[in-house]
Amino acid sequence: MQRLEIGQWCKELLQKLQNGFGSRLCCVGLQGSYRRGEATEKSDIDIVLVLDTLSANDLQAYRALLAQMPYHQKACGFVCGKQELLHWAPSDLIALYHDTQVLYGSLGFLLPLFSQKDAVLAVKLSAGNLYHACCHSLLFENAMQNLPALYKQAFFLIQTYQYAKTGMYFASKQALLPHCQGLLQQILQQTPTGEQPPGACGGQTLQQYQALLTLCAQLLEESSQMG
């Protein structure tokens, strides 16, 4: 199978979406590692699809359309109706708006639905979720294997924190790193593989979990002061 060319793939998908949904398309976009220029062979293709309204039949039609695409097993992403998005939690809209490379239409209708206060709330929610995930993983799951996903979650947390603090949204780790220091920089520079034997949990793993727990505690406290 040939190497995935994301630009051509998205162009082909967009054509199918236009043929299938026509004027009902409000926005089509690309997110994730392909949007950030960080994709590997294992990366998913994160597509944003916003229709005027969304039904179960629409989801089935989209599923059938994706099945016609090469690398369809990599496809994932966010699907929604426009009206639902207009009533979405504003703290969740920040990442959707800033992380999406729009391929068709616009997400401009989301403005000005979120504010700096919503960004602070997003930090608090993300930090709490990551804290809980770290505790649950270290107690009940394969702690080593889960580290890559947890560190990816930490990237999104730090990204949101910098946005809440500065109003600037840095789309990639490379862009974010120069604006971080101390623990934040240390965490961004680590890339756990999770490939060690199941159940292995040595000193380095505990140090990495401690770094994540400390990060969450720090940003929970700071977001309370910012709010």
Image (cartoon, rainbow, N blue to C red):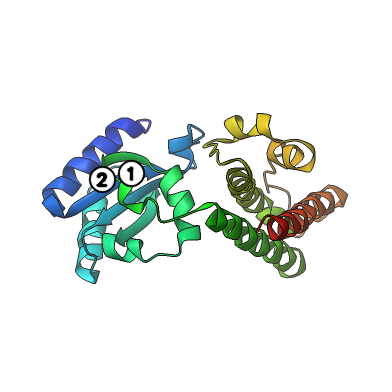
Quadrant into which the N terminus falls = top left
Q: Which label belongs to residue 29?
A: 1
Within the image, what quadrant is residue 135 found in?
bottom right
What residue would you read off at disc 2? 69
Residue 44 makes an appearance in the image: no
Taking depth in this image into account, of 84 and 212 the one nearest to the observer is 84
Residue 79 makes an appearance in the image: yes
Within the image, what quadrant is residue 82 found in?
bottom left
Is residue 199 shown left or right of residue 81?
Answer: right
Indicate which label's residue lies in the foreground, 2 or 1: 1
Do the residues under discs 2 and 1 have CB atoms within 8 angstroms? no
Taking depth in this image into account, of 1 and 6 the one nearest to the observer is 6
Give amino acid for label 2: Met
Q: How many marks?
A: 2
Mark pair 2, 1: CA separation:
16 Å
Image location (x, y in percent) of residue 112: 39, 52
Asked which secondary structure carries label 1, the reply is strand
Give amino acid for label 1: Gly
Give the residue displayed 48% in from the left and 50% down from the top.
Answer: 95
Precedes in sequence: disc 2 or disc 1: 1
Image location (x, y in percent) of residue 129: 63, 64
